[in-house]
Image (tube, rainbow, N blue to C red):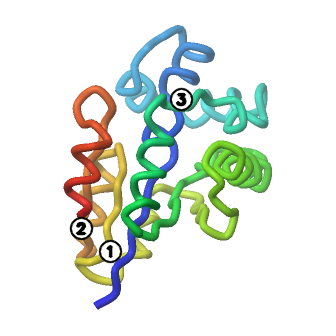
Amino acid sequence: MEFNLYLDSDEIFYKWRPYVMDKYFNGNDIDWLNKHPQRDEMLSEGYKAEPNLFANLWTYDDSAYFINSLRDAGIPFKILTSIGTVHHLPEQARHDKCLRFYEDFNVRSSDVITVMKSEDKRTFVKGKYCILVDDYHRNTSQWEDSGGTAILHTHGTHTFKETLERIK
């Protein structure tokens, strides 16, 4: 039995929603954006206006606690994050995500896996001992439907301490 822990990036460690929604979408919420008929075009324009957006995201205050707790417990992990098909410079996005994880948490780029679409995360499931921690319900549902174990983590609802207990 192989144990693998995969952690999403945006909205687990980095504040994508507050940053993007405040800066580019007048503070509307993510549901508004996801239902908007021109969602992809609007996101694409945001990424074109700020190609290194992922390098500029704010970090959640307790992110280092989570990473360090996993390390202290000897729990290996990889970051599994999507770039999005609307980003016009996917290699720039990957570079920025890897650089931030290295600078903020000393996570090597070889431990950061990027996929273009979030639904592609499920291809990493190798059984029920493959765990995904993600903030997006669709991702956790698809992961479980593929035979893995998923933990939905949303700031304000779940703490990193609670999520750590579920992992252990």
Q: CA distance from mark 1 to mark 3?
A: 35 Å
27 relative to 60, above or below: above
Q: Are marks 2 and 1 in contact (CB under 8 Å)?
A: yes
Residue 41 image offset from top left, x and y in percent:
62, 33
The residue type indicated by label 2 comes to: Thr
Q: For marks 2 and 3, give the one nearer the viewer.
A: 2
- Local packing at callout 1 (Cα closer than 10 Å; few below 14, some 14-19, many 20+) is many
Tell which circle, 1 or 3, labels the residue nearer the N-terminal end: 3
Residue 60 image offset from top left, x and y in percent:
48, 31
Q: Answer with the quarter of the image where residue 7 lies.
A: bottom left
Residue 79 image offset from top left, x and y in percent:
52, 60
Q: CA distance from mark 2 to mark 1?
A: 6 Å
User: Disc 1 designates what residue?
Assistant: 130
Judge left or right: residue 69 versus residue 26: left
Tell which circle, 2 or 3, labels the residue nearer the N-terminal end: 3
Helix, strand or loop at disc 1? Answer: strand
Mark identifier at residue 149: 2
Q: Nearer the viewer, residue 106 or 21?
A: 106
Q: Are marks 2 and 3 in contact (CB under 8 Å)?
A: no
Judge left or right: residue 78 versus residue 73: right
The residue type indicated by label 1 comes to: Cys
Q: Residue furthest front?
A: 72
The residue type indicated by label 3 comes to: Gln
96 relative to 3, above or below: above
User: Disc 3 designates what residue?
Assistant: 38
